[in-house]
Amino acid sequence: MGKFSKGILGHFSGTVGTVVGSSWRGIDYMRSKANKKTGVATQAQLEQQQKFSLMIKFLQTLKGLLEITFQNYAVNMTGSNSALSYNLKNAITGAYPAFSIDYSMALLSRGDLPNATAPNATAGAAGKVHFTWTDNSGTGKALATDIAVLIVYCPDKALSIYTTNAAVRSAGSDLLDVTAFSGKTVQTWMAFISADGNEISNSVFTGQVNVV
């Protein structure tokens, strides 16, 4: 049963007839009550379900990061949902039922702050991934104090390790400890965030690395 809080024209929660009322992030909304699903899913529905499941498995390991790195594109939605929407459209490859993620096309950070020049990732000392880049401070909004965001995902473990507090742009390199992924093949990305946290770059794929 629905509950009215401010009269007939005010917000209500619950179900009234075929209308459902609710609130999210302080925004009141109404929607039609969903019809019960009947019959067998169509081919298109099966394909979309598989894509969704595949991408959720990947992005849920980065949920905390995505709330930060997609904040400027999260209009009336969470950063995670904004990232999901983008990557469903752009980072799925293959044909049903053999879809896979094209990690080189995955975007894990989104914004117009310049990324670094020549970003790269290689195996460092045992359990480390060594990220390097060329300092391009002064290019557009890029500042020497921008902070590197380093991201490593291990498909075998379905886990990610990342930091939003790595070296500054002017440093040109940093190491990320991924000891938990020793002996595994991982996928890597990097991005930059301004010191005040307001400006963010698009992430860039820095390749596949075999962790020592």
Image (tube, rainbow, N blue to C red):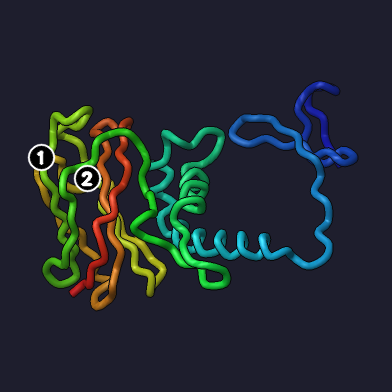
State the residue at coordinates (10%, 47%).
Answer: 172
Residue 102 placement (x, y as % from top left): 40, 61
How packed is label 2: few (under 14 Cα within 10 Å), some, or many (20 or more)?
many
Could you say which disc has been placed on residue 34 in the image? Answer: none
State the residue at coordinates (28%, 34%).
Answer: 113
Query: For the residue marked with disc 1, what is the amino acid?
Result: Ser
Q: Is 93 placed left or right of 153 in the picture?
A: right
Against 192, residue 151 (above or below) is below
Could you say which disc has been placed on residue 170 in the image? Answer: 1
Q: Nearer the viewer, residue 202 or 182?
A: 202
* The image quarter in which residue 153 lies: bottom left
Which residue is farthest right? 17
Distance between mark 2 and mark 1 Cα atoms = 10 Å
Q: Which residue is mark 2?
A: 148
Against 7, residue 187 (above or below) is below
Q: Nearer the viewer, residue 65 or 118?
A: 118
Residue 23 placement (x, y as % from top left): 68, 35
* The image quarter in which residue 6 lies: top right
- SS for callout 1: helix
- SS for callout 2: strand
